[in-house]
Image (spheres, grey):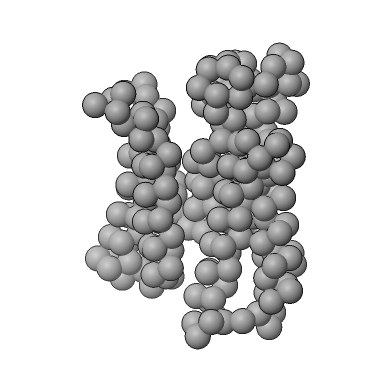
């Protein structure tokens, strides 16, 4: 259990890196949380500071999710960890998901920035990219199409959030891709609900 807590703790610290806050201070000496939407995320950084700072924030936020779910558990080591009644590969997936969630929590409540962070969309995308890159690349393609057509990042984010668990379900249950464990589908559904809740004000504006 100590190893599990270490993995979760390190993942939270990785997620706590406030890329948008630091990019705003580096490029324009501003705190993005005091401008625009008040959100410490890449989208608000694009609006408030510019594309260079926004791009840095987006890449770092994605990287935090990839690192937490795809690197930290394997660096610490998962040998001899509890399986919780699951087969080995499913237990590893559950632990990687938990590490990814810890990073998302760190992004939303960052230790290094007074626990005032962003919505966690890019970090969540990084987690999913580490867990199932093929599915996530398809979803990212859909995200870009919706963004180019609508010009609304929020709409593209919500569309991608709905598309991910749908794609996992289709690939697993229609095409029989067994490597996509049920835990990944449940995680995708959880993130879908979380993203929609986080964007409820955007939904009201769009409607």
Count the marks: how many?
Answer: 0
Task: Report the residue at 49% width, 53% height from top.
Answer: 128
The picture places residue 96, in percent across and down from the top left corner, at: 58, 64
Point out the image quarter for the C terminus.
Answer: top left
Task: Report the residue at 56% width, 35% height from top.
Answer: 118
108 lies above or below 180: above
Q: Is residue 51 visible?
A: no
Task: Identify which residue, 33 or 162, lies in the foreground.
Answer: 33
The picture places residue 34, in percent across and down from the top left corner, at: 61, 19
Point out the image quarter for the N terminus.
Answer: bottom right
Task: Report the residue at 31% width, 70% height from top.
Answer: 176
161 relative to 39 in the view: left or right: left
Q: Tell me where residue 73 sits by quadrant.
A: bottom right
Task: Identify which residue, 71 or 112, lies in the foreground.
Answer: 112
Task: Identify which residue, 30 or 51, lies in the foreground.
Answer: 30
153 lies above or below 142: above
Q: Tell me where residue 170 sits by quadrant.
A: bottom left
Task: Report the residue at 50% width, 85% height from top.
Answer: 85
The picture places residue 64, in percent across and down from the top left corner, at: 64, 46
147 relative to 85 in the view: left or right: left
The picture places residue 53, in percent across and down from the top left corner, at: 65, 22
Q: Is residue 90 visible?
A: yes
Q: Tell me where residue 181 sits by quadrant.
A: bottom left
Task: Identify which residue, 88 or 49, lies in the foreground.
Answer: 49
64 lies above or below 76: above
């Amino acid at each position: 259990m100590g190893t599990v807590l270490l993995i979760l703790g390190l993942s939270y610290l990785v997620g706590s890196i406030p890329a948008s806050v630091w990019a705003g201070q580096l490029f324009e000496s501003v705190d993005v949380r005091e401008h625009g939407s008040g959100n410490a995320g890449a989208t608000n950084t694009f609006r408030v500071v510019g594309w260079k700072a926004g791009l840095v924030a987006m890449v770092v936020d994605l990287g935090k999710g990839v690192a937490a779910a795809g690197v930290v558990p394997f660096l610490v080591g998962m040998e001899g960890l509890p399986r919780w009644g699951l087969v080995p590969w499913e237990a590893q997936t559950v632990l990687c998901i938990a590490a990814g969630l810890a990073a998302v929590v760190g992004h939303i409540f960052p230790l290094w920035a007074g626990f005032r962070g962003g919505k966690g969309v890019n970090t969540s995308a990084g987690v999913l990219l580490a867990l199932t890159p093929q599915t996530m690349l398809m979803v990212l393609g859909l995200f870009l199409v919706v963004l180019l057509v609508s010009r609304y990042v929020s709409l593209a984010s919500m569309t991608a959030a709905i598309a991910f668990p749908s794609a996992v379900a289709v690939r697993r249950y229609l095409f029989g891709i067994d490597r996509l464990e049920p835990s990944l589908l449940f995680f995708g559904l959880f993130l879908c609900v979380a993203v929609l809740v986080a964007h409820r004000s955007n939904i009201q504006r769009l409607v």
